[in-house]
Image (spheres, grey):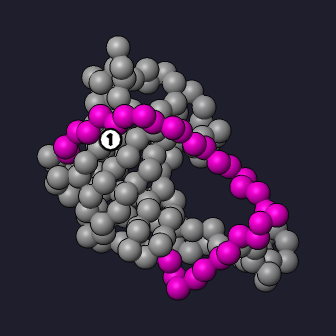
């Protein structure tokens, strides 16, 4: 994104790493276009319908063409930073808007752990993977086109 590349040295560690291993996914076709708010309501409703305990964190995937993706990427320490209170931020942040973008969106829902898996005050955390460009970035805003695929962990009873 932004024609930048940041190779992470082997001795650096992730600030946050949330993982989940899913054996089988339940695939749900999304036949409507959704704004971010309505998409979250749809995912929550489908998670409950498919037996997920929405009081616990759960992962999900969205695959398809997205009408709009607002993305940001933290790309290393900003060497122009001279202290808090100035206009220069500690880390370089690249923001980009993508329209009609093919992507896989990897998300976590966790209302009970806001600020742990998600940003403070939020229940959802999403990252877009754009394979053709080898990009992974945080999703700030999202809207879908029709025929996006939602994947939820399959519950085996």
x then y, percent, for residue 151 = 32, 41
Q: How many marks?
A: 1
Residue 5's x, y, as percent?
Answer: 60, 80
Please indicate whether residue 7 sits to the left or right of residue 150 in the image.
right
Kindly give the residue lying farthest to the bottom in the view shown: 3
Residue at the image point whose x is 44% and y is 60% from the top: 128
115 shown above or below 10: above
Front residue of 24/103: it is: 24
**Is 30 situated above or below 56?**
below
Q: Residues within 10 Å of mark 1 (few under 14, many from 20)?
A: many
Per the image, the residue denoted by label 1 is 151
Secondary-structure class at tag 1: strand
- Looking at the picture, does residue 139 appear above or below residue 81? above
The residue drawn where x is 68% and y is 49% is 16
| Magenta stretch prevailing secondary structure | loop
Point out the residue furthest to the top here: 157
Residue at point 47%, 66% (across, down):
71
Q: Does the rendering let one see residue 125?
A: yes
- Residue 6 is inside the magenta segment: yes
Residue 130 position, x and y percent, is 41, 67
Q: Quadrant of residue 76?
A: bottom right
In what quadrant of the picture does the C terminus appear? top left
Toward the front, the furthest residue is 23
The residue shown at (52%, 30%) is 57
Query: Can residue 89 be seen?
Result: no
For the magenta stretch, what is the residue range? Answer: 1-30
């Amino acid at each position: 994104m932004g024609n930048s590349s940041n190779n992470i040295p082997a001795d650096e560690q992730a600030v946050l790493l949330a993982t989940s291993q899913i054996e089988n996914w339940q695939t749900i076709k999304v036949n409507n276009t959704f704004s971010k708010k309505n998409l979250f309501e749809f995912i929550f409703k489908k998670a409950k319908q498919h037996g997920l305990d929405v009081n616990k964190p759960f992962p999900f995937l969205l695959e398809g063409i997205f009408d709009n993706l607002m993305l940001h990427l933290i790309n290393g320490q900003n060497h122009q930073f001279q202290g808090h209170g100035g206009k220069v931020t500690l880390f370089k942040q690249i923001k980009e808007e993508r329209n009609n973008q093919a992507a896989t969106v990897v998300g976590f829902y966790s209302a009970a752990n806001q600020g742990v898996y998600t940003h403070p005050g939020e229940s959802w955390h999403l990252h877009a993977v754009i394979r053709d460009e080898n990009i992974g970035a945080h999703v700030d805003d999202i809207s879908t086109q029709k025929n996006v695929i939602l994947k939820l962990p399959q519950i085996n009873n």
